[in-house]
Image (tube, helix red, strand yellow):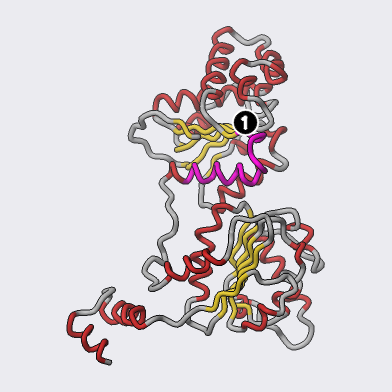
């Protein structure tokens, strides 16, 4: 889906330059793309802050040339903007000269219409060409032909927009060299535990899935949930990890209504990457999430009120959603109306795992010296 030529040594200031026609995509699709990129740590340059003139200026040309990837969002009215067409010319030039990677999204427009400048896309292009020099028109035509020849993403071929956006983000991350987190690779036994959970907890489903992880404090519930979250989150446009709910939302004496509102507010702000979402009633989460596929981790839950409004009703999140709950109290999981698909009880370390843990803390090694190993076996 990505295309590039051999790159020269260059300092990239941005991960992505995004070229788009605002009137076609700004209200919904574009905001979701930006939210996804932000959640993945992808730095995006968009030209909202630049005052548009007759032609693309040096600031914009510099931004294009200093972006590792250009994402061209081709829509029906893209060619109605001379600004967009000038951007595209610079992008294709940058692809050739400095090895910029280019990916295309054909949003509700046929790639052949873009390549040949026909149909409604072609009509918009012809209108933009009025009073332009032949040199300018030819440069635009060539850029459109070239970009349409890059294998890209078609909105009509994807099951839904969230899937399309996830695929684009994954490809961009691959180009940037982003790799899955290895933060917990040294956590003894984590691989075995994750494999066991996945073998019992069927992830590929349109049903809402709920996983409970139970066990005493310090046994690794949060770490296990974090590893699962890191592995699953690339497939979700909307996701959040609410850590240490027990410590962050301690129930005061009296009414806990305001705490419930604050918990929902925090969750929604994280899911949508916004800091100004106001929750005025307890049905707000369902209003905003009932049609969305989300991944939510509720970590260290210790009281029923923390789950009462968010996880007791089946319809508060959309199809395909996954909810992961960690708690010391197994009874809380069994009481959920939403229904737990699987409860994973964190096991205590085996004898071999205990030895590895001891060695890591004692000497920084994964295995003991011969003498210590013999002593451990005898003991």
Task: Please provide percent x and percent y for residue 379.
Answer: 28, 92
Residues shaded magenta: 154-173
Please tell me whether residue 131 is drawn above or below residue 49 in the rendered image: above
Residue 164 in the magenta stretch? The answer is yes
Please tell me whether residue 133 is drawn above or below residue 329 in the rendered image: above
| Residue at the spot of label 1 | 106
Task: Please provide percent x and percent y for residue 333.
Answer: 66, 78
Residue sitting at 66 percent across and 29 percent down? 75
For label 1, the SS is strand
Residue 106 in the magenta stretch? The answer is no
Name the residue at the bottom extreme: 379
Task: Please provide percent x and percent y for residue 308.
Answer: 75, 75
Please tell me whether residue 365 is drawn above or below residue 177 in the rendered image: below
Task: Please provide percent x and percent y for residue 55.
Answer: 58, 22
Name the residue at the top extreme: 134
Could one spot residue 273 in this view of the protein?
no
- In this picture, residue 8 sits left or right of residue 193: left
- In this picture, residue 43 sits left or right of residue 327: left
Quarter of the image for residue 9 reads top left
Residue sitting at 54 percent across and 26 percent down? 57
Could one spot residue 221 in this view of the protein?
yes
Residue sitting at 61 percent across and 71 percent down? 342
Quarter of the image for residue 258 reads bottom right
Q: Residues within 10 Å of mark 1 (few under 14, many from 20)?
A: many
């Amino acid at each position: 889906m990505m295309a590039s030529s051999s790159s020269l040594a260059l300092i990239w200031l941005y991960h992505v330059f995004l070229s788009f026609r605002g009137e076609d995509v700004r209200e919904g699709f574009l905001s979701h793309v930006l939210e996804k990129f932000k959640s993945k740590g992808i730095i995006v340059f968009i030209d909202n802050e630049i005052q548009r003139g007759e032609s693309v200026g040096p600031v914009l040309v510099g931004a294009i040339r200093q972006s590792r990837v250009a994402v061209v969002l081709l829509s029906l009215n893209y060619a109605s903007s001379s600004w967009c067409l000038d951007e595209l010319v610079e992008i294709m030039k940058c692809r050739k000269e400095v090895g910029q990677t280019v990916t295309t999204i054909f949003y509700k427009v046929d790639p052949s219409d873009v390549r040949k400048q026909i149909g409604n896309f072609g009509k918009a292009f012809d209108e933009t060409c009025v009073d332009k020099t032949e040199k300018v028109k030819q440069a635009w035509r060539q850029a459109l032909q070239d970009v349409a020849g890059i294998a890209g993403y078609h909105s009509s071929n994807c099951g839904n927009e969230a899937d399309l956006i996830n695929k684009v983000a994954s490809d961009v991350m691959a180009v940037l060299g982003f790799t899955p987190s290895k933060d917990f690779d040294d956590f003894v036994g984590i691989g075995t535990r994750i494999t066991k959970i996945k073998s019992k907890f069927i992830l590929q489903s349109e049903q809402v899935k709920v996983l409970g992880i139970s066990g005493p404090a310090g046994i690794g519930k949060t770490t296990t949930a974090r590893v699962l979250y890191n592995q699953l989150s690339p497939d979700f446009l909307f996701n959040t990890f609410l850590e240490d709910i027990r410590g962050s939302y301690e129930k005061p004496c009296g009414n806990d209504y305001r705490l419930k509102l604050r918990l929902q507010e925090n969750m929604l702000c994280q899911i949508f990457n916004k800091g100004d979402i106001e929750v005025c009633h307890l049905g707000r989460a369902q209003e905003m999430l009932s049609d969305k596929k989300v991944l939510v981790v509720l970590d260290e839950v210790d009281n029923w009120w923390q789950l009462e409004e968010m996880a007791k009703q089946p319809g508060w999140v959309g199809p395909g959603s996954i909810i992961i709950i960690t708690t010391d109290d197994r009874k809380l999981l069994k009481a959920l109306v939403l229904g737990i698909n699987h409860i994973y009880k964190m096991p205590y370390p085996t004898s071999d795992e205990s030895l590895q843990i001891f060695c890591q803390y004692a000497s920084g090694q994964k295995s003991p010296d011969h003498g210590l190993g013999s002593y451990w076996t005898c003991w």
